[in-house]
């Protein structure tokens, strides 16, 4: 698979390639107490004097965090902290050599992306705490009525902004003055005083690059909207970091649809949003290994469009035979036992047959 080509920073591709090779032991393995855990690795932190393992090293994204001294960052940042004589170019060069690719991302862009990702992680961390606080009772009830279990909600990494002011205060606490006002202004324009579920949106390497919101008191498409600028993610399907490297991709439309399918064990599932499988989203999935697409979209029109684009890209498309009474994947999964959607995926309809069946509806 070819990594290292991106519509924003090609660092995303470099990190993706190294994550697929499980590069963490090579980078952090010399630390005292280094060993694997359920979600990644842990080791003694090299940035403060303590013999107890407190450095968490993520398994699904290029990051680390010490829960004692607060040190955190990505892999380039880690190399620069560990070896003070290294330059940014030296650190990138080491990673490029390990991955076997070259990138063009400069230091200014890298620092900008790292600051954005770490800021959003801090904001989302506060939002998750709000969801599980007394303030989050209404939101948890909403999710419960939709059929989500506590375990599923926790696994989805959902958070809650009880009102605009909450997320503003969170941003204000973690942002530096030069960029604070720009970020807060974007948040003010996104939503008002209604409770909003916050949905973390990550790039293909798993870096948090945007937040989407779901108004728990709203309905329909208008209930969903971006809370932050999503420019860096316009080419990345939702949950691409989880589907990276899978030759078979399950394509659903809604973010909660994708999260729920992922939580019940469906591998290689991505969400594409209201615009459907756009050329940019398709190109990214193909770049990261996808060759066969199982479509479980919300409308006939979106399915027709996706099939045309998939076949034009030289890939294979099939359609999930979801009963018409279910408007989306989420509704089907919630109304059936959790393994039933998996069985549907084993009985998909070839694109040619589906097109023949639905030809009249396209006229």
Image (spheres, grey):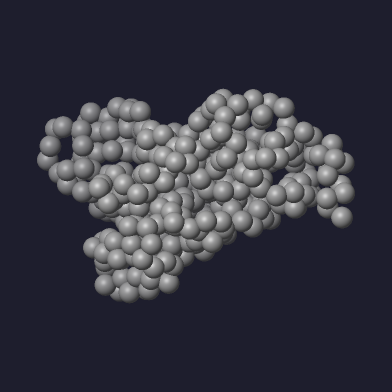
Residue 203 at x, y percent in the picture: 49, 51
Please state which of residues 139 and 103 is positioned toward the viewer in this rendering: 139
Quarter residue 35 falls in: top left
Please state which of residues 156 and 13 is positioned toward the viewer in this rendering: 156
Quarter residue 54 falls in: top left
User: Does any portion of residue 300 appear in the rendered image?
Assistant: yes
Image point (40%, 57%), residue name: 196
Please, is residue 48 above or below residue 186 in the view? above
Residue 234 at x, y percent in the picture: 56, 59
Quick one: quadrant of the N terminus?
Answer: top right
Image point (32%, 52%), residue name: 127
Residue 353 at x, y percent in the picture: 84, 36
Q: Is residue 73 left or right of residue 291?
A: left
User: Does any portion of residue 19 appear in the rendered image?
Assistant: no
Q: Is residue 145 left or right of residue 172?
A: right
Image point (23%, 43%), residue name: 66
Please state which of residues 190 and 18 is positioned toward the viewer in this rendering: 190
Count of labels shown?
A: 0
Please state which of residues 266 and 329 is positioned toward the viewer in this rendering: 329
Please, is residue 22 above or below residue 122 in the view? above
Q: Is residue 103 left or right of residue 65?
A: right
Image point (83%, 44%), residue name: 358
Q: Is residue 98 left or right of residue 47?
A: right
Quick one: quadrant of the C terminus?
Answer: bottom right
Residue 267 at x, y percent in the picture: 56, 32
């Amino acid at each position: 698979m070819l990594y290292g080509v991106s519509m924003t920073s090609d660092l995303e591709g470099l990190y993706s390639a190294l994550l697929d090779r499980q590069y963490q032991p090579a980078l952090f393995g010399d630390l005292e107490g280094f060993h694997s855990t359920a979600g990644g690795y842990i080791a003694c932190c090299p940035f403060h004097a303590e013999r107890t393992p407190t450095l968490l090293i993520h398994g699904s994204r290029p990051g680390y965090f010490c829960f004692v001294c607060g040190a955190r960052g990505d892999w380039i940042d880690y190399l620069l902290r560990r070896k003070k004589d290294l330059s940014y170019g030296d650190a990138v060069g080491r990673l490029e050599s390990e991955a076997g690719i070259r990138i063009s991302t400069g230091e200014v862009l890298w620092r900008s992306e790292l600051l954005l990702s770490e800021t959003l992680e801090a904001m989302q961390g506060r939002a998750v705490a709000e969801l599980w606080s007394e303030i989050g009772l209404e939101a948890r009830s909403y999710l419960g009525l939709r059929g989500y279990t506590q375990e599923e909600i926790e696994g989805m990494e959902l958070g809650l902004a009880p009102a605009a002011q909450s997320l503003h205060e969170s941003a204000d606490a973690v942002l530096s003055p030069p960029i604070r006002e720009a970020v807060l202004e974007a948040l003010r324009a996104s939503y008002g005083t209604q409770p909003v579920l916050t949905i973390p949106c990550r790039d293909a390497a798993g870096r948090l690059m945007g937040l989407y919101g779901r108004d728990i008191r709203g309905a329909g498409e208008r209930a969903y909207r971006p809370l932050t600028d999503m420019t860096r993610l316009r080419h990345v399907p939702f949950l691409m970091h989880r589907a990276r490297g899978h030759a078979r991709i399950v394509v659903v439309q809604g973010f909660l649809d994708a999260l729920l399918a992922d939580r019940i064990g469906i591998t290689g599932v991505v969400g594409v949003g209201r615009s459907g499988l756009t050329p940019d989203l398709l190109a990214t999935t193909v770049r990261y290994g996808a060759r066969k697409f199982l479509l479980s979209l919300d409308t006939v029109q979106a399915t027709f469009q996706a099939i045309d684009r998939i076949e034009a890209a030289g890939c294979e498309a099939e359609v999930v035979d979801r009963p018409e009474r279910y408007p989306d994947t989420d509704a089907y999964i919630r109304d059936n036992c959790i393994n039933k959607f998996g069985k549907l995926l084993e009985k998909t309809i070839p694109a040619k047959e589906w097109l023949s069946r639905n030809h009249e509806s396209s006229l």
